Image (spheres, rainbow, N blue to C red):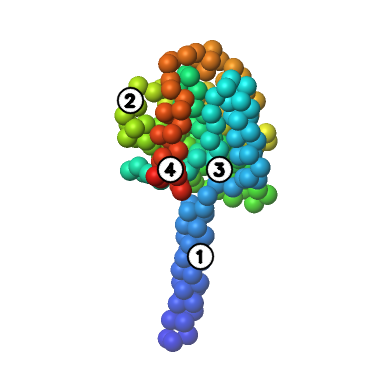
Amino acid sequence: MLDIIVSIAVPVLALALLVFVLYTQNKKKTQKVASGTGRGKAKAAQMAARFARSNGYRCIAPAHFTGGKAETTLDAVVVGYFGVLGVRALDYGGNIYGSVGEDEWVQIAGKEETRTVFENPIKQAAADVRVIRDALFAAKLKKVPVEVVCVFTDPKVQLALPKNTGHYTMTTFKPLLRREKYVEDAGIDLDAVEKAIRAALAGEEGK
């Protein structure tokens, strides 16, 4: 009788252990940050900086906002006569799956095709806009147009995203900066807007 109990219990325990291991591994994967090379962020920031210099605008790169209700980090913020343009650079590799309305997107990358879940960057960009506007409102600047764009920087990344998602790649980001709206004069005071933004950045409070 004891032998029968042991023969049943061992496989059951082994199966339970396997399920626990798989659950733990999957949980770790969903908590990981989507992986990339890290080099693309600098390139996107440099492109934004060149755009700013060529038009006599201001560029802050990177920009880590801490002075308002929420924190966020952008790879570059351009202050121009058109308003404010923030850049969130994503150097993720592999295959990216998602849509505008989803809270989380999926990256499948590497030889092992590791599946990683990460926050929808388009929704992050919308939150970034609110952070910048809070900084401007605090300085009584309430009519400044603000936009934040998401740029995928890895040239090999495969984006399984709808066309209306609102994302860019390094190939499409450059033409974006040539659009007429970014050279229009909306009467923005560059000094006042830059000062308000810097007041909300890490280490800049009170300066």
Q: Nearer the viewer, residue 38 or 83?
A: 83
Q: Are marks 1 and 4 in contact (CB under 8 Å)?
A: no
Q: Cα distance, mark 1 to mark 3?
A: 22 Å
* Mark 4 burial class by Cα count in 10 Å: few <14, some 14-19, many 20+: few
Q: Which residue is mark 2?
A: 142
N-term-proximal mark, 4 vs 2:
2
Q: Which residue is mark 4?
A: 207
Please determine whether, in this image, residue 6 is positioned above or below residue 29: below
Please determine whether, in this image, residue 125 is positioned above or below residue 81: below
Q: Secondary structure at mark 1?
A: helix
Q: Amino acid at mark 1?
A: Val
Q: Secondary structure at mark 2?
A: loop
**Which x, y percent locates residue 151?**
56, 32
- Residue drawn at x 59%, y 17% as measured from the top left: 178
Q: Are marks 3 and 2 in contact (CB under 8 Å)?
A: no
N-term-proximal mark, 3 vs 2:
3
Q: Which residue is mark 1?
A: 21
Would you say 59 lies left or right of 155 here? left
Q: Which residue is mark 3?
A: 107
N-term-proximal mark, 1 vs 3:
1
Q: Secondary structure at mark 4?
A: loop
Q: Cα distance, mark 3 to mark 2?
A: 38 Å
Q: Nearer the viewer, residue 174 or 171?
A: 174
* Mark 1 burial class by Cα count in 10 Å: few <14, some 14-19, many 20+: few
N-term-proximal mark, 4 vs 3:
3
